Image (tube, rainbow, N blue to C red):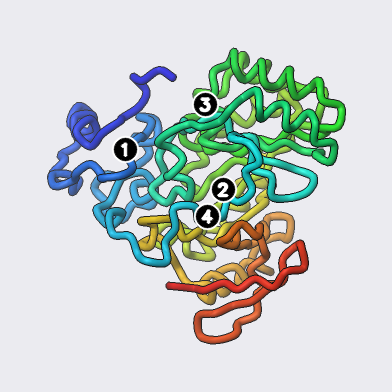
Amino acid sequence: MDKNNFIFSSAQLKDYLTSKGIDTEKAFLENHTEPAKFFTLIPKYYLNLINWYDPADPLRQMAVASSLEDTIYDYELQDPIGDHSHEPVPGIIHRYPDRCLLMLTNVCAIHCRFCFRKNLLTENKAMYEQAMEYIKRTADLWEVIFSGGDPFMLTDYFLNQVMNRLDSFDHIRIIRFHTRTPAVFPRRITDKFIRNIRSRKQIIVVIHINHPREITPEFIRSLRLLKKAKVMLLSQTVLLKGVNDNTEILAELFKELVAVGVKPYYLHHLDPAAGTHYFRISVEEGKKIYQRLRGTISGHCIPEYVIDSPGGHGKIPVMWFERMSENEYEAVNFEGKKIRYTDYC
């Protein structure tokens, strides 16, 4: 990773904006301070997409730290989706029978302020050989999902080594990547990078993208390169207050994604990660926004709206949840268990 392409602190952010002729006082950055627990990381490419004279700019909200992050409510969790309860070896999360997460990096292209794994990004405990041996010996696995951290930020050499290793496992048929990189740092996607993710297996790339303004000519160029590797392109989006909690914004995002060859896959209700409360909307508000999409846009543009249930019980479609009281919901997960969900918004 060329560090010259990134901003790593509030001080660097102010200096960079000043060099671009932006008045940091008018950009409401004069009193901006570094967050206590989750440092700033923003590609300069992404900074250039932000309207710095709009304090409510949605891209700014996602990328620039807020003092609100340092307030953590009792219901917010360090491990909001129960990863640790499904970690047979460091670097593997095996929640569902036929697929597992392979988490080999704690590096991202950007530190999203709503991140649900920010507790993992301070250190990398993955044990590569143990993780690969686990995949090799677990015959029920059909799909391996690169996550992290952002797997697209792995070095070209290491990524090539891992892909070659996975290619040798006959029981693995699908290799999936979850990444925010094409939307926030598209120059990472090069011809060399594409050569390193080619495989005789089916490759799926799920791009994390939250707002129509993240669809740029550079983003579209990265998609064209990914298509050279014959990948299936999907997207996932987090429903965020002040960013995309609006049917019109989501409709524009999903239509534009389909128009450039990306199938909207998941719309996530915000996980109860520590310090993310200011991005949260209620389940009922989210359902109204989602329901208005039906008929507004084509069915193939509409993702599944899900809650990744706290405690590690997996993703459950929001529409499966029955409201039991004002803020209590219940649904049955894929294992047939009744799962209770409390909406703290």
Amino acid bearing label 3:
Met
Separation of disc 1 and disc 3 at Cα? 17 Å
Above-or-below relation of 338 to 88: below
Residue drawn at (57%, 57%) of the image: 268
Q: Mark 2 points at which residue?
A: 84
Q: Residue at x 36, y 44 (%)?
A: 63
x then y, percent, for residue 314: 66, 57
**The disc label shown at residue 238, or none:** 4
Q: Distance between the residues labelled 2 and 3?
A: 23 Å
Q: Residue at x 55, y 86 (%)?
A: 325
Question: Where is residue 244 shown, x and y percent of the image?
Answer: 47, 58
Amino acid, disc 2: His
Foreground: disc 2 or disc 1: 2
Disc sitting over residue 40 in the figure: 1
> Which numbered disc flags the more N-terminal residue, 2 or 3?
2
Mark 2 closeness class: few <14, some 14–19, many ≥20 residues within 10 Å: some
- Relative side of 170 to 163, left or right: right
Residue at which label 3 appears: 153
Q: Which of marks 4 and 1 is in front?
A: 1
For the residue marked with disc 1, what is the amino acid? Thr
- Mark nearest the camera among 4 and 3 is 3
| Residue 56 visible to the viewer | yes
The earlier-in-sequence mark between 1 and 3 is: 1
